Image (tube, rainbow, N blue to C red):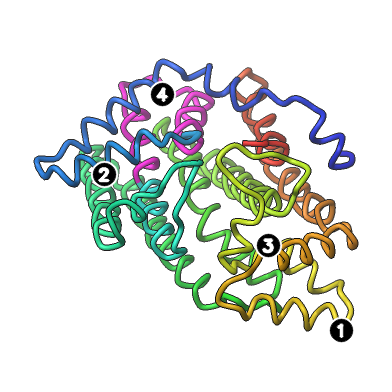
Amino acid sequence: MGTVIQLKNRINNSYFDLKSSVEEKLVLVEEKIKTKLNSEVSLVQKMTDYHIQTGGKRLRALLTLGSAKLCGYLKGGQDINLAACVELIHAATLLHDDVIDFSNFRRGKKTTNSIWGNQSSILVGDYLLSRCFEMMVENGNLEILKLLSSTSSIIAQGEVLQLQHKGEIDMLEETYLKIISTKTAALFSASTKVGAILANKKNKEKDALEFYGKNLGLTFQIADDTLDYNSEIKIFGKEVGNDFYEGKITLPIILLFQKTNSIEKQNLKNIFKKNKRTKNDLEFTLGLIFKYNIINECYKKAEHFINLASNSLSIFPISDEKKVLENLTTFSLERSF
């Protein structure tokens, strides 16, 4: 796929192609979410309105709509209902994440916990999940109910696993992949598999879309973690070093620790043992990342998952929907927002 510079210089419109291909349904997803989150409790209404207004790519909802379209789903609006479900699960995890990570900003705006406090944010996150499960029951498909409920359980376990290894600078790459497989990739794979289930496809198609979503999610998270240390890219709503200041051990740090000499290793250990890291600490770490060419190393790791995701769609006949999903694997790596 070439160097990082080539990756950045190529314009990839697959995200917008996917969005435009299901635009009418995405509008209905937004309406469904707003309707479902109506509450007579004023604080709940304020917080959910605020959280919705902070936006986001709605990528998981798009994946549900796109996979359903790929599989030829034409019956009613269950794809809209379930696209809203996966977005509510995602939104709930973000609310909980921000509390766990003591985050003050997300997508360039203040987090709900920084405005209304941790207790309210946790409870509203639970409220989003409960609304989601109401919608899943209304759907009436036991296979989908089992899939999305088990996915919620997997995500929660991933959060705990990440906490268990917090600050562990010598973390195994295998452990990191397990964390992001549960925290991120699980919901991606559920989002894509839902489309095949709705269309009553055979297990072969269901498994293919599940595998596609998982590897797309892994690519997406590796790219996100790498962007945190890539000072050459300006990210909308994301400052370089967010993960670093929060003390998160992600792939760039894991690969860096493997390559550094004993003195550098000790310096990195000391930095991540701190309760708070400074700008000088970040500059030192970025210098080592540049020295050992870690950014390119991370992208090479991600390319492996890109290829797995793209190849998994080979069982589907050629179509515009298939092409968009294939191209989306590249967007997940090249994106700058």
Report if residue 191 lies within the magenta region: no
Question: Residue at the spot x=31%, y=21% of the render?
Answer: 76
For marks 3 and 2, give the one nearer the viewer: 3
Circle number at residue 26: 4
Could you tell me how far apart the alpha carbons at marks 3 and 1 are, in whole angstroms? 23 Å
Q: Do the residues bearing badges 3 and 2 touch, measured as CB atoms within 8 Å?
A: no
- Judged from the image, the secondary structure of the residue bearing numbered disc 2 is helix
92 relative to 73, above or below: below
Could you tell me how far apart the alpha carbons at marks 4 and 3 are, in whole angstroms? 41 Å
Could you tell me how far apart the alpha carbons at marks 4 and 1 are, in whole angstroms? 52 Å
Measuring from the top left, give residue 175's x and y in whole percent.
Answer: 63, 72
Three-letter amino acid code of the residue under disc 2: Met
Three-letter amino acid code of the residue under disc 4: Leu
Question: Residue at the spot x=71%, y=41% of the render?
Answer: 333
For the residue pair 235 and 198, the one nearer the viewer reads as 235
Label 3 or label 1, whichever comes before in sequence order: 1
- Report which residue position mark 2 lands on: 47
Label 4 or label 1, whichever comes before in sequence order: 4
Mark 2: few/some/many CA within 10 Å (<14, 14-19, 20+): many
Q: In the image, 169: left or right of 299?
A: left
Circle number at residue 207: none
295 relative to 23, above or below: below
Label 2 or label 1, whichever comes before in sequence order: 2
Question: Residue at the spot x=42%, y=57% of the render?
Answer: 98
- Report which residue position mark 1 lands on: 262
For marks 3 and 1, give the one nearer the viewer: 3
Mark 4: few/some/many CA within 10 Å (<14, 14-19, 20+): many
Circle number at residue 279: 3
For the residue pair 246 and 312, the one nearer the viewer reads as 246
Residue range in magenta is 59-88
Q: In the image, 241: left or right of 112?
A: right
Q: Quadrant of residue 102?
A: bottom left
